[in-house]
Image (spheres, grey):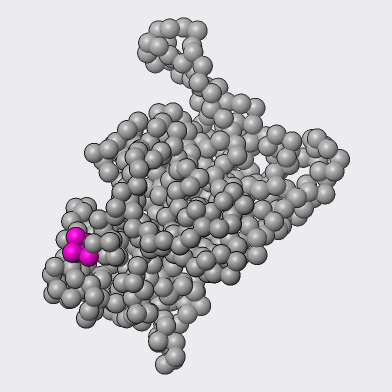
Amino acid sequence: MKLNKVLLSLVMLSTGAIGAYAYQFSSNQTDIKKTESITPNATVENVLQVSSLADQDVLFNALYHLVDKNDLKNPQDMEAYNTALKNQYKVSYIGDVLTAYEYKGFTQYVNNGEERYLVAFSHRSAKYSDDLTAEGSALDLFLFKKSGEKYQLIAQTSKEGLVNGTSGGAAVDDLVFDHIMNSQPIDLGSSNKGYFVNFIGQRGGGIYNKATVILMNEQNHKISDITTDDLYLMEQSWGGDAPEYKYDSFYKLEPKEEQNGVYGLDVYFTGTALIGMNEQGLGGKVVPYHMSKTYQFNGESFVLKSKESKNPFSAESNYDQYTKYFSTIDNAGYAPIPYESVLAAIDGRSIDYWLGQGIRFYKPSNKAKEFYTWNVKGLKVHGLDVIGIERGVCDATGEDRCGWAGETTIILDTDVSTARKQLKEKTFVDYQNLNDEQKKTYPELYPTKVNGQEKAALIFSSEGEDEYDDI
């Protein structure tokens, strides 16, 4: 099918505002620069507008400087150029590095009552464009709003983009992109939206979950990751050359601690951690780790507000206090479950700390004698809308150490037959025809009633002795 032709226009607008400034795009249009206007009583803007977000060829030409074989800076780039073209990538330069780009698509959401459109391209060095293990991809994001019949660019990432995937033998691509396409942005501040991504990867002898918080700052026209390099939400060492340890966490944004347009961030850790290693990564010891950290936004990134303090939500450090915090965080019956947690449950058949424990500190939408139910919104997995999470408890106090406590249910906004078909296509698991051995490890698909309508429920009957009771 022939795609609609995109029209690119640079429009000069005058608004009569005082203290005006102009926005100028660099030659490859990856940076927005703010400069003072010559006329103090009028605003003049160079505005990048397109008539469609679907034609990737013309959209790429609008946002980047397309390079062909006659534009190569170095003769040795020819092989990388041919590799990129063979894999149907677009090619441009970042500095002197020939780079391969892929149009990923766009998603839309509402901010302050206005539609927003987020366009994504991924890129990596052209010479590695057919080798995921050699170099993980980066993600370029461009935020548009509607302006008449066109779409106007209002914010974007830097030319380096955001880390989007991992490399190596266990490489996983599109970690950030998949989160964005399957989640609605959250309120990171009273007027700013963004995404809180659990960036999960592997490294020698272990696994980690690093926070990636993407702030879409329309006022400053920037999209950026505002987390620091050391904000790990989970780390686990499997032993070998390093001691075994594991800590996990859940987190919440705190509107009362808003600073520079971004809410405060509280992270609650529990488990064990390795401390005291030297610069060579040797030595150290494993100690109990049940601490909390508070971060504030300094205008560029989250920074630690104060020293670590004890985690009041940890069963290990203070069990009596821990149970008192069940169902105390009021989020109108909704639980901010990460996309990665539900994906791990369905694909990996494992309940992580968020689903196993963190969710229980939020007030549920419904309390029954043996189960709590939380609403979920703006979350998709394998094309299916997730609308609820149900967790087993022993009684209405939230006690979680007996009875149905090991049972977790993911409620999907569709019927059983549709869910079964979709999951079979995406995961190659036919939930209607599990054999006896598979039923011991796979969740089971059942019908359930939500507001009188039949919905599909994936029920995890056990967490494998509920490992989180031990940390």
Q: Choose between 101 and 74: the one closer to the eye.
A: 74
| Residue drawn at (72%, 53%) of the image | 128
Picture layout, residue 183 above or below residue 187:
below
Residue found at the far right of this picture:
75
Query: Is residue 188 visible from the viewing direction of this image?
Result: no
| Residue drawn at (41%, 34%) of the image | 217
Please state the extent of the stretch shown in magenta in the rendering: 319-323
Q: Choose between 44 and 359: the one closer to the eye.
A: 359
Magenta-drawn stretch contains 10: no
Where's the N terminus, which quadrant? Answer: bottom right
User: What percent of the width, then of the height, locates residue 258?
Assistant: 29, 36
Picture layout, residue 176 above or below residue 386:
above
Q: Choose between 76 and 52: the one closer to the eye.
A: 76
Magenta-drawn stretch contains 322: yes
User: What percent of the width, then of the height, locates residue 461?
Assistant: 32, 81
| Residue drawn at (43%, 14%) of the image | 20
Picture layout, residue 470 above or below residue 168:
below
| Residue drawn at (36%, 74%) of the image | 467
